Image (tube, rainbow, N blue to C red):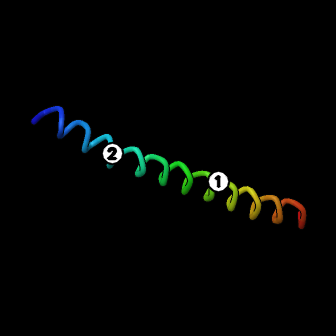
Amino acid sequence: MKRVLREMSLFILLPLTCLAFRMTTGLARFTYSVAGKDWDHG
């Protein structure tokens, strides 16, 4: 039962981690682009 639970948690955690990573990357890019625009305007 423990092994099944571990595999299930892995099956759930893997996509969640991927999604969180993509969200963080997207947020970082968005912040960088906004900050870059503000920087250009000086």
In percent of width and height, residue 40 lies at: 90, 62
Picture residue at 40% right of the left edge, 44% below the top: 14
Indicate which disc residue 28 carries.
1
Q: In front of the other: label 2 or label 1?
A: 2
In percent of width and height, residue 15 lies at: 42, 50
Picture residue at 26% right of the left edge, 43% below the top: 9
Q: Residue furthest top?
A: 3
| Left or right: 33 as drawn, with respect to 18 | right
The quadrant of the image that shows the C terminus is bottom right
Label 2: how many residues lie within 10 Å, few (<14), some (14-19) or many (20+)? few
Asked if 22 appears above or below 40 in the picture, the reply is above
Q: Earlier in the sequence, mark 2 or mark 1?
A: 2
| Left or right: 36 as drawn, with respect to 27 | right
Q: For mark 2, give the secondary structure.
A: helix
Indicate which disc residue 36 carries.
none
| Left or right: 29 as drawn, with respect to 39 | left
Q: Amino acid at mark 2?
A: Phe
Asked if 38 appears above or below 14 in the picture, the reply is below
The quadrant of the image that shows the N terminus is top left
Q: Quadrant of residue 34?
A: bottom right
